[in-house]
Amino acid sequence: MAVTDFETKVGVVVRDDLAGWQRLNVCAFLISGVTAAAGPDAIGEDYFDADSNRYLPLLVQPVLIFEANASKLKTLRDRAHRRGIPIALYTREMFSTGHDAANRAAVRAVRAADLDLVGIALRAPHRDADAVLRGLNHHP
């Protein structure tokens, strides 16, 4: 199925000045937030190979990965906020924390306008997702 075959679009945006390992780490954390919020209907069934070995289910729809600079990430956060679209976020401070509670505390300590965003992700109806993600380039 193509991206357009789904009622929603999933997009992850990572900052363009991150190291490779940081980009992968941010994507993994962000998509976990999108998946958790999407609920069980967004998760497929278990996978099995020809030997009947079981593998974990995956998100049922494609995920589009984009990149943006720090300023654009703030713009995207603001667009999503104005439209009431929930986003997952990852801030630079979260690279130095060791667990979920510390991540939440790091975000909670900073006003929205001052968050040092390194990535965001969303799952929203196509029109809303497109309005938030407009002007972005796909990750190379």
Image (cartoon, helix red, strand yellow):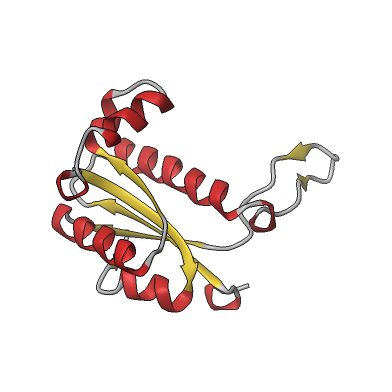
**Where in the figure is residue 26, as x and y percent of width and height?**
36, 41
Left or right of 112 in this view: 44? right
Check the picture and name the quadrant holding the N terminus.
bottom right
The image quadrant of residue 59 is bottom right
Q: Is residue 8 above or below residue 43?
A: below
Instruction: Say which residue appears at 27% left-offset and 30% top-offset.
Output: 106
Could you say which quadrant of the image residue 44 lies in?
bottom right
* Residue at the (27%, 68%) spot, across then down: 136
Q: Is residue 55 above or below residue 81?
A: above
Q: Quadrant of the C terminus?
A: bottom left
Q: Position of residue 12 (x, y in %)?
A: 39, 56
Task: Using the image as rendered, state which of residue 132 and residue 51 is in the foreground.
Answer: 132
Q: Indicate the quadrant where residue 81 lies.
A: bottom left
Q: Is residue 20 left or right of residue 48?
A: left
55, above or below 42, in the image: above
Q: Position of residue 129 (x, y in %)?
A: 41, 70
Task: For residue 138, say whether it is visible.
Answer: no
| Label tally | 0
Question: In this rendering, does residue 37 appear at all?
Answer: yes
